[in-house]
Amino acid sequence: MPARFNLGWDCCGQWAQDRNRFALYWEDESGFEERYSFWDLQQRANRLSNALAALGVRRGDRIAIVLPQRPETAIAYIAAFQMGAVALPLSHLFGPEALEYRLSDSEARVAIVEPATLPNLGAARQTARAQARDRRGRGA
């Protein structure tokens, strides 16, 4: 591996100058189709990287990606990789306990989730906060 390597660039960025270079075809269960060029993916990844940086995410920080397999998931990984962040893949099917354990153990700075995952994430967050209060109360 080279001394300086960026997986985001290697997977997408180097091909993004050609706006017509095909990258991804996606079709959902209902038959809805989308097509993306490398340029499309890179533009979306750049916007997400900028939003994450505005939230304080920096090189080496962990980003939990809690999404099903779809274009937004690929974009989230590209955004994380090009920032030098660590992408933490988590299943969108995890319940609150599984999310709480993995998020607290990984020290993820942010989580990228779909709306359906928010209730489980909220419950995991409440549990983590309650445990932190208990530890402070015990002087730990």
Image (tube, rainbow, N blue to C red):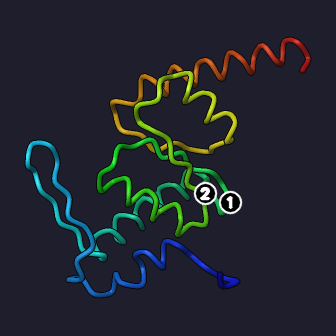
Q: Position of residue 132 (x, y in %)?
A: 74, 21
Instruction: Answer left or right for 112 relative to 22.
Output: right
Vertical arrangement, residue 110 with respect to residue 4, above or below: above
Q: Residue at x 38, y 60 (%)?
A: 75
Q: Is residue 14 above or below residue 77?
A: below
Quadrant containing the N terminus is bottom right
Figure quadrant of the C terminus? top right
At label 2, counting other C-alpha atoms closer than 10 Å, the crowd grade (few under 14, some 14-19, many 20 or more) is some
Pointer 2 with pointer 1, Cβ within 8 A:
yes
Quick one: SS at disc 1? loop
Residue for point 55% across, 54% down: 87
Q: Is residue 118 left or right of residue 125?
A: left
Crowd tier of the residue under label 1, counting other residues whose Cα lies within 10 Å: few below 14, some 14–19, many 20 or above: few
Name the kind of residue labelled 2 in the image: Val
Q: Is residue 78 above or below residue 133?
A: below
**Closer to the N terminus: mark 2 or mark 1?**
1
Residue 49 position within the rendered picture, expressed as x and y whole percent measured from the top left: 48, 62
Return the residue found at the far left: 31
Q: Which mark is residue 86?
A: 2
Estimate the x, y position of residue 86 in percent, counting from the top left. 61, 57
Q: Residue at x 14, y 43 (%)?
A: 29
Find residue 113 and name its label: none
Please say if 49 is above or below 117.
Answer: below
Q: Is residue 30 left or right of residue 116?
A: left
Q: Amino acid at mark 1?
A: Gly
The spot of residue 19 in percent (x, y) is 24, 83
From mark 2 to mark 1, how far is it between C-alphas? 6 Å
Residue 60 shows which numbered tag? Answer: 1
- Helix, strand or loop under label 2: strand
